[in-house]
Amino acid sequence: MTLLSAPVEAAPIGRLQLSNVPRFAKRHPLVLLGGGLLTVLIALALAAPLYAGDAVNMDPFKRLLPPSADMWFGSDNLGRDVFARTIFGTRISLMVGLLSATCAAVGGLLIGILAGYSRAFDGVAMRVMDGLMSIPTILLAIALISLTGPGIGILIVAIAIPELPGVARLVRSVVLTVRERPYVEAAVCGGARLPKVLWRHILPSTIPPLMVQAANVCASAILTEAGLSFLGVGVPPEIPSWGNMIASSRLYLAIAPMTIFAPGICLAVTVLAVNLLGDGLRDLFDPRAKRRR
Amino acid sequence: MNTPLLNVDRLTKHFPLSAGILNREIPVVRAVEDVSFSVSAGETLCIVGESGCGKSTVARLLMRLAEPTSGRVLIEGTDIAGLRKGSLRTWRRRMQMVFQDPYSSLNPRLTAEKIITEPVENFERLSRRQRKALAADLLRKVGMSPQMMDRLPSELSGGQRQRLGIARALALQPSLLIADEAVSALDVSVQAQILNLLLDLQKQMGIALIFISHDLGVVEHIGHRVAVMYLGRIVELAHCEALFAKPVHPYTEALIAAAPIPDPTRVRLEAPVEGEVPSPINPPKGCAFHPRCPLAVERCRIDVPPLVAMADGRVVACHVRAPATEALATTRTPEGTAAQTHG
């Protein structure tokens, strides 16, 4: 039994070597594809000021123009460059997605580890998490934003909070299984203090599932941000974001389809990239999931 | 005889089974019941018994990986069962444990060096160089090459992993080593190597050893004294040769008779005991062994037999073979006599 289960469980990722790269690519194409796409998007977003032009400048004489050499994706109802707005929108989406995922992951990790180790904290924290789970994401976001006024910071917090319970429960379940492992007991016997046991022996096991979950949170955060912006409670309207763009140009779909297709397609591609990366990571960290197919 | 290194006094562990809040009586698993023994410096005490008889729970209680329900564990006179976390840490240095499964008892993400030096680093800061030196020293002690220190557990064989487990236990220079089924996950040739390693280390460093096993062959080979457990209680505690030459308790007798003899020409006695081990949730009244015992009399169904000291120093809990009137010993200090005859 131990012989069968040990290699699957133990399989730590081998030391990184350049010669392993082609084999890695062949085995985990999803990681490469999703990661690659995401890297390109991040690069495009970071370099936006260098090539994208002005995303805010309005020109009433150039409204709803078709794509041209000057404005690749044409212009919107206020005469703004759709290409520039789409590119700058990438920054908002990725920032909201990545930061919400980070917040949810860090917060959920802390709550999950403490809940997994302390019975007393577990009871309280998990009931609070149950409560959070019952609040619809969009509703919570609308409520929070109407309290403070629109802003990217509050948006990130509003998106991250409803994701906390999922992450916390996941981490807690890993901690509950790992803390019973003999090597954790051995560490305790060796005189390790609790923080060291948690940090050195328990935390590392929670990272792989946490990363997969964070990728999922990131994808859904990007969608939620777009949805909230579309409803007008997300990113302030003067900042170009995909949700804002789709909302303001939905009336002009027949006249200037690029105004809606550009942000729409970008949104789809970004979420796809993040999801592919998430799936790829899941297969990478759990060899059993892959083999079963 | 001066104070023994370890004195275990009436150690008891009940695991409550979680039942509904409305149930007034919570059923408990009586894993360890009234277990007393002592271990002197440099001695090997073996604890044998079937699976589920409480051997491993005793080990976990000694290391305080589980909290005893009652009873005391005295190391050099200090009761560690009542210690708080801080002082417990320092007392744990005196006792270390080798775990059963060499596959799951090593953190798969740490190198051999980090695994075996971690206990020391819990108590003092080591420089990189000191750590390497310590790791090399420990690896040599357990018969491994210092070059192995950069390996991950997954890159080592079962025997090598168990050597690492022993090296980790030796790192704090304990005076008592608890080996909980330390060789049963290994194949026979490797078992012999690990056993010899343990015995060599014991001789060199004068460590006392509590060796928990279900393998009587191994126990006969290494034990000074042997405690036989049945359903959470010690039924017989005797010197190794005496126990194997002439078991007194009918359970010990059956256990020894049931052990395989590595000689096809010798005919084994028919197993004198029938039936299964009863559940520790609701153990039989009186002597726990009476439903399976060929000698059982009426009294066995009513009274729990006390541990009674016999003439040769062993203690036995049996109404028939060791009637309490025969000796003055009481259950409170069965060790008094047993320890005197030792060494």
Image: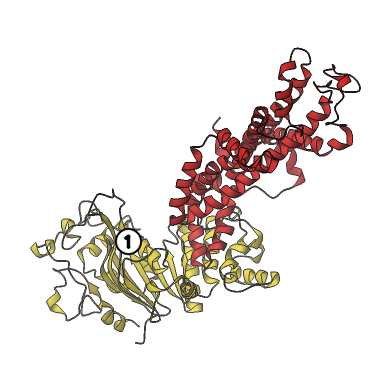
Mark 1 surroundings: few (<14), some (14-19) or many (≥20) residues within 10 A:
many
Is A291 rendered above or below residue B324? above
Q: Residue A5, how many percent across, how many down?
A: 50, 45
Specify the subunit that label 1 lies on.
B
Is B162 rendered above or below residue A56? below
- From this viewpoint, is residue B108 visible? no
Q: Return the residue nearer the eye: A266 or B249.
A: A266
Q: Return the residue nearer the eye: B170 or B21.
A: B21
Q: Residue A123, how many percent across, how many down?
A: 43, 51
Q: Quadrant of residue A271?
A: top right
| Residue at the spot 72% in from the left edge and 17% down from the top edge | A251
**Which chain is tinted red?**
A
Looking at the image, which residue sits at the far bottom? B2
Quarter in which the C terminus of chain B is drawn: bottom left
**Which chain is tinted yellow?**
B
Q: Is residue A276 left or right of residue B221?
A: right
Say what amino acid the circle numbered 1 marks.
Answer: Gly
| Residue at the spot 71% in from the left edge and 19% down from the top edge | A250
Residue at the spot of label 1: B54
Q: Quadrant of residue B318?
A: bottom left
Q: Is residue B38 left or right of residue A287?
A: left
Looking at the image, which residue sits at the far left? B298
Q: Residue B26, how many percent across, how many down?
A: 25, 54
Quarter in which the N terminus of chain B is drawn: bottom left
Q: How many marks?
A: 1
Q: Return the residue nearer the eye: A276 or B160.
A: A276
Q: Quadrant of residue A151?
A: top right
Q: Residue B59, how many percent across, how many down?
A: 39, 65
| Residue at the spot 53% in from the left edge and 53% down from the top edge | A113
Secondary structure state at the residue bearing disc 1: loop
